[in-house]
Image (tube, helix red, strand yellow):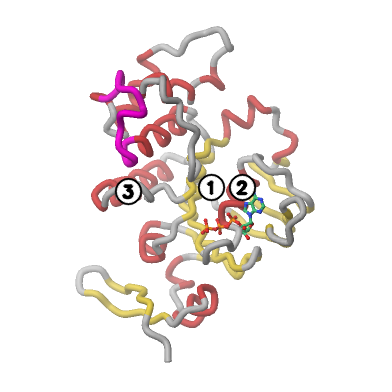
Amino acid sequence: MECQHVSYQYPHQAAGITDVTGTFPAGQVTTVIGPNGAGKSTVLRLLARQLPVAAGQITLAGKSLGQYTTKELAQQVAMVAQRHQLYDDMTVGEIVGTGRLPYHSLLQTVPAEEVAPYLATTGLTQLVDEHIQNLSGGQQQRVWLAAALAQEPAVLLLDEPTTYLDVHYQQKLMQQLRQLATTGITVIQVLHDINQAFRFSDWLWLIRKGQLVTQGRPDDLRQADLLAQTFQTPIEIVSVPRLGPYIVQVPGD
Ligand SMILES: Nc1ncnc2c1ncn2[C@@H]1O[C@H](COP(=O)(O)OP(=O)(O)OP(=O)(O)O)[C@@H](O)[C@H]1O
């Protein structure tokens, strides 16, 4: 997936993103990082075509995103959003089944066996008949992930997917996303934990004030000055035994 000179402004707002050109390498995990309000979620929403590009273009497999039909796009791109509508009266199995809808006609019900593998990979098999409102925030987050995986997308977008997860599931999710990428899925996520971003990504986007500061491999972008400038806070890179380089925020003068 690629952005070429992409701009977007929210109606009646100065905010948005400006002239963003960059790539999301296929079959790799790209993480978008940057301060609050930098435009990270806006980028994801443009990639999911939830917002229209105002200038420039986004391409997927060489074809402009605007040229995909809604159904084609739903088969190609899945999004795990930051906030979700809650379907209180739906069970876990039913919600995960919604991910299969782009592959069925409207009147068809989704067979349970189609949903089972995605429940299994997200550890939800035992909760299949549970109503979503009875689940914890972290369990609900896994339901949305399972629904997105059930879409069998070429591109998986995740906006702060670790927010409701405890450290165990955060780690598990990061490993799972890497595993998914090895199967050819292009993973694009927004994370706030910089160290997690550097550790579990193949490619990074640094965004600030609606602009792409730079993109590159984690090893090339692990520079204290660059990160300090992007986040406007003093940063040092220290070495932690068994973990390697670790980015820490240090008190300013
Ligand atoms: N629906 C909206 N209408 C108007 N302005 C918006 C809307 N959504 C976001 N913005 C503005 O656009 C800018 C970028 O927002 P965005 O949510 O993309 O940032 P972000 O980097 O994801 O932030 P955060 O880290 O806080 O989630 C911000 O200034 C925000 O106030």
Q: Quadrant of residue 12?
A: bottom right
Q: Which residue is mark 1?
A: 26
The reply to whether the C-beta atoms of the residues labelled 2 and 1 are less than 8 Å apart is: yes
Q: Is mark 2 within 8 Å of ligand 1?
A: no
Residue in front for this viewpoint, 97 or 149: 97
Where does label 2 land, which residue?
1
Relative to 43, say whether 231 is above or below: below
Q: Position of residue 253 (x, y in %)?
A: 42, 92
Q: Is residue 246 left or right of residue 81?
A: left
Q: Quadrant of residue 115?
A: top left
Residue 146, above or below 61: above
Residue range of the region highlighted in magenta in the rendering: 127-139
Residue positioned 73% across, 57% down in the render: 13
Give the camera-side residue of 130 and 70: 130
**Which quarter holds ligand 1?**
bottom right
Q: Amino acid at mark 1?
A: Ala
Classed neighbour count for the residue bearing mark 2: other residues with Cα under 10 Å, few (<14), some (14–19), many (≥20): many
Q: Is residue 211 left or right of residue 159?
A: right
Q: Earlier in the sequence, mark 2 or mark 1?
A: 2
Question: Is-magenta flag for residue 201?
Answer: no
Q: Identify which amino acid the numbered label 2 is placed on.
A: Met
- Give the numbered dot on residue 175: 3
Q: Secondary structure at mark 1?
A: loop
Q: Amino acid at mark 3?
A: Gln
